[in-house]
Image: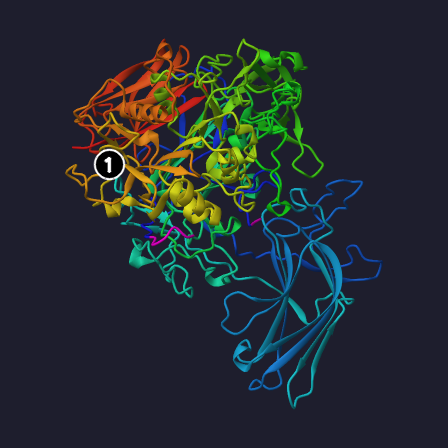
Amino acid sequence: MKKNLLLLTAAIVLAWSCAAAAGEMPRFMKGDATILGGNAHLSKAAGDTIQLMGPTGSGAAYLGDFEAGWNGWTTEDLTRTTISHWQVSDFGLAPGERAAWCGDTAFASCDDSLDASGGYGHNWHDLLVFRRAVADPQAAASVQLTASLQWDSEPGFDYVYLSTKTNGQIGYTNIRSWDGAGSESVSEFMSFDPAELIDGTDVYVLFRFQSDGGWDDEDCSWPTSGACRVDDVVVTISQGGQADIVSSTDFQDGTFGDWVIAYPDGVGDFAQIWSGLEDIDPCRTNYSNQIAFIDDNIVVPGTGGGTCVNWCYGPAGYIVNTVGGLAGPAFHVQNFVDSPIMAWPNASYDGVLLEFDVFRHEDLSVDAPGVFYMFGVRSGTSAAATGDATWLDRNGVYFGDGDYFREFFPVTDLMTPGRTHVQVQLGVWEAGWIWGWIGNDGYPAPYFDNVSLKIYPFSGPGMSTNELRIANDAFPEVDAINLTDLGSLHVRFDAAQNISPSTHLRNDPGDSTVIDIVPVRTGATLAGPPMLHYVIDANPLFDPYRTSPVSGAVPGAPADPGTGIPDDAKWAFDLPDTGLLFPGDVLHYYVRAGDDVGGDVQYSTLPANLAGFGDFSHPLAYSSSFTVHALPSIRDDGFGGFDVPGILFWNDFANRGGEDEWYGALSNLGFRAGVDYDIYYTNRPDSGVGNGIGGRTSGLALEFYDDMLYTSGDMAVATISNGDYNVDAGNDIGALLNWMSDGNKDLFLTGDSLVGDLAINAGAAGGAFSEDVMGVNLLATDVRSFINGQTTPLVRAVPGNPVIQTVDSWIAYGGCLQINTFDGVVARAGAQRLAEFTDQNGNPGAYSFAAATLNVYNGTNRIVSMPYDLRYLYTDTSAKDAAPLAARARILGEVLSFFGRDGDPGAVTGVVPEARFEVSNYPNPFNPSTQIAYSIKAPGRLTLKVFDVRGQLVKTLIDGHVEESSHILWDGTDASGAKVASGVYFTEARMGGDVQVGKMALVK
C-alpha cells in the first residue's frame, strides 16, 4: 500500500547487523527470496515435525507469542556498544615505541604472505576523548589539535573522524574524516561558544572510528593493519585574556594520558510489547500483544518521540524513529529482539523452518526513510557457543505495502552441523540511506507476533541460493545482431547480480552461479564436489559454431568472496561463455550435492524437485528460476533466410505471481513460446541489481522484435530502471528508447505501480518515459481514495476506442486477501483513454482516471498501458459479452490484434500445463466451505494442513501418498469437527523438498 500521494505534475555500505556473504551488499526484498534445495524423494512419517517454538497452547517448548510477556526474549540496540578497541600499543611500531591504536590483535592473518595478524571488525564505533575545563566558562574558546595519524579502512564505508561534541548535542560534529589508507600530520582548529561547553565548563574533542557490517578483517574481505593509530597529540585551548591550556600526550608511558575511552550513545532500544496496535490492512487486524519499535519518547526518554507525517495510525501518532534517536541524525535505528537460546529437540533432525507474522509497511516513496524488517538465526554445539555465534541471514532487508504477512524462511543451511542449541532474532533497520531513501515520512511498522520454529528430518546437505546469484536470461555479448556472422552471437552464462560497486559506474554481472552448500548432519562432510547438471534445447542453426556439449555436468569450486580465500560453504558453478549458448537456446540446470556420514551418503538437489527438467514443451514445465533463455530465437526459415518471433514478453515480475495468468492467456490465444514470442525473465526484479533488459542489451539486440509485452506485477520500485548505479545499474529506459528509435514498434505495459515508480523514483528519464512514451500523467500513487475507496473497481471500455472492442467490462482486482494499489493516471494531450474506472454502481463518467491508455510515440510507435497488472484483470461475470475465455486473455488478444498479431488457431490450448507444485483454493473468501486444489509434478507423499493466524494446527486434510493432482474440500471445521471462527487461515502443503503456503479467509 502506497501513500495517497497527490501530484499536481509528474515531476519528479553499510551497517549490516546480521552476517551474510562476506562483502555482499544487502538487497531490499518484498518477501523471502530464498530458493532451498532438498530431496524430492524424502518420505516423512506422520507427526515427524517438532514445533520447537510456537504460540501459547501449541505445546511448543518455547513461546513465540507475547500474550504472557517476553517469555525469555531479550532486546538489543545494535547501535550502542560497550566495547572499545582503543589501546596503547606498540603494534606495527619500532621496539620501544607506543601510540594509541584502534584495532584487535586477535584477528588472524587473512593471507600469511600479504596480511599480518590484527585488524578491525564489523560494526565498530570506538571513541577516544579529550575533555578539559576552560579557564573562563563565560568566554568563547578556540582549540587547536595537532597529531600524527595513520589509518587503514575500507574506503567509502569505514571512517576515522576527528569530532567535537557540545552541551546537549545529540551525536557529534565531524571536523575531518579519513578513509582508505594513508598518514597525515593533522592540524585542525575548533571553536566553542560558552553555551556549547559540556556542563558549562568543558571542551570535548574526540577521535572516533566507525565501521559497517562487512569488508574488514573479521570476514577477511578487506584486510588491514588496524583501523588507525594516533600519536604525539597536542591540544591547545586559547581564550582571550587567559593563559593557554596545553596538553601533550605521546603515550610512551603506556597510558592514554589526558585522553580517555568513552562509549557512544546508541539510537535507542525501542523494542516494546504493545497491545491494540492499529494498522492500515483492510483485510486483517491483530489487537493482541505484538512487538514493535515505536518511539513514543517514553520507552527511550529524550528523543522527543518519532513524529508522523502521513502515517499516523500508531499510538498517539508515534512512529519508528527516523532521525537517529539519542545518537543523532547521522545514525539509523537498528533494534532487535532475540529469542531464548533453545535446546535442539532431536539430534537426528536437521531441517529448520522459521515462521512469523509481521505487519510490514514501507512504501519506498520519494520521502520514505527506508525502514525495513529483518531476521537472523544462529546455532552452536552448546548454549554458550550459540550465544557467541554470528547471526546469519539471507543478506536481505524486507518491506511491504502496509499489510499483515506471514513470513516463511527455511534456514536449514544456516545451521551449525551437530548443533545442540538455536536462537532466533527479529528486528528493524532504517537502511534506506544505502539506496538514497533519506526521508522522514515513516511508519509505526514493523510489528512482530506468532513466531514459530519447526524442526524436521532433512536429507542431504543444506543448499540455498536466491535468483540474484544464479544465471539470468541474456542476449549475445556483441549486442548487435549480425546475421552474416552467426558464430559471433554467443550468449554468456552470467548471474543476475551486478557485482561492481556503484562507484565503479558499470554493470558487471557475476560470471558464476553461486550456491550455499553445507553439510548439516552431525559429522557430515561433502561427498565430493557438488555438480551442476544441464541440458539445452539447442537451436540447430548454431550447431556448426557450438564447441561444447548440449548436456552434461560440471563440478563446482569453492567461491572466492573477494578476499582471495575460497569459502568452502559457497560453491561457484560456471558454464562456457562462448561456444555453448546461442540465440534460440533454452537451458535447464540444477545442482546436486551429497554429504557423507561414515559411508551413509545422502543427496540434495537445487531446485529440490526436478520434475520437468529437460521438458521444453511449455515455459512452466520446469522451474523458471533455473531456466535460461538465450535471445533472440533466430531460426532458419527453410528458404535461405531467418525467422525471429515478433513478440518479446518481458517478465519483470519473475515467478512472484502472474506467470500462469500471462502464459495461460498466451496459450489460450494460440501463441507459442520460442515461435511466436520470446521470453526475457528478470531474476528477482524487486532487488534492482541491473538485470533488466537494459542490463543485458543497449537495445540493439531487440531489433527484430516488433512488439513487446511487459509486466511489473505489484512492484513499486525497480521496475523500468534509468541506469542509476546507486539503485539499478541497468538502463532499461535507454534500451527501450533505442529499440523504438527506428519506429513502428508496439509496447504493452502493465503494472500496479509502474507509472508511480517511473515518475517518482526514476529521475528525469523516468518522468519523460511515463509522460512522452506512455502518454500519461501521474495524479496519485493509490487511486482508491479518488474512486470512493473501491479496491475491486469495475472497469468499462470507452465506446469506440480503437483497441478494446469486444470486451465491454472487467474487474481490476485489488481486494483481500492482499490489497493492491493501482496508480491514478490520466491521459495526456494526444493520448487516448481506452477504459475508465466506474463508480461503485458500475456507472461510467464518474472519474477522469484512465484504466487503459493508448499513446503514439514519435509518430509510429504505439504504446498501450494499464495501471494494474494483467494478473489482476478479472472477468466481469455479469457482463453481457460473457465468453469462454477469461477477460485477461480476450483483452490481451485485442491488444495484440491491434498490434497486428494473431495467434495460431491450431496452437490454442485451454489450460497451462500442470508443471509445478502449487496449491490454491476457491472461493476465497469463503463461507462455509472452500475447495483446495493441489497440482503435483509426480506421485509422492503429500501433507496438506490448515493453520490459524497464530500458527496453531487447525486440521490435517491430507497426509499420505497421492498419485495425481486433485482437490479436497475444507468445510471450515477443526480436527474435532467443530466449526472454526471467521478469520484468516493458512494452508501449508509439503511434498518432498517443496513447501507451498496459501492464505484464505472465512467470512461469516
Asked if the magenta segment contains residue 116, the reply would be no
Quadrant holding the C terminus: top left
Is 200 left or right of 245, judged from the image as shown? Answer: left
Magenta stretch?
A: 7-14
**Vertical arrangement, residue 172 with respect to residue 401, above or below:** below
Q: Which residue is mark 1?
A: 792
| Residue 406 picture quarter | top left
Q: Is residue 127 left or right of residue 709?
A: right
* Principal secondary structure, stretch drawn in magenta: loop
919 lies left or right of 758 = left
* Above or below, 412 relative to 217: above
Q: Quadrant of residue 789?
A: top left
Residue 241 in the image: state x and y as whole percent: 65, 91
| Mark 1: secondary structure | loop
Image location (x, y in percent) of residue 29: 46, 39
List x then y, in percent, for residue 149: 73, 63
At horizontal 70% and vertical 50% (from top left) the residue drawn is 119
**719 relative to 992, above or below:** below
Image height of 777 relative to 667, above or below: below
Given the current orientation, which residue lies at the most extreme left position? 841
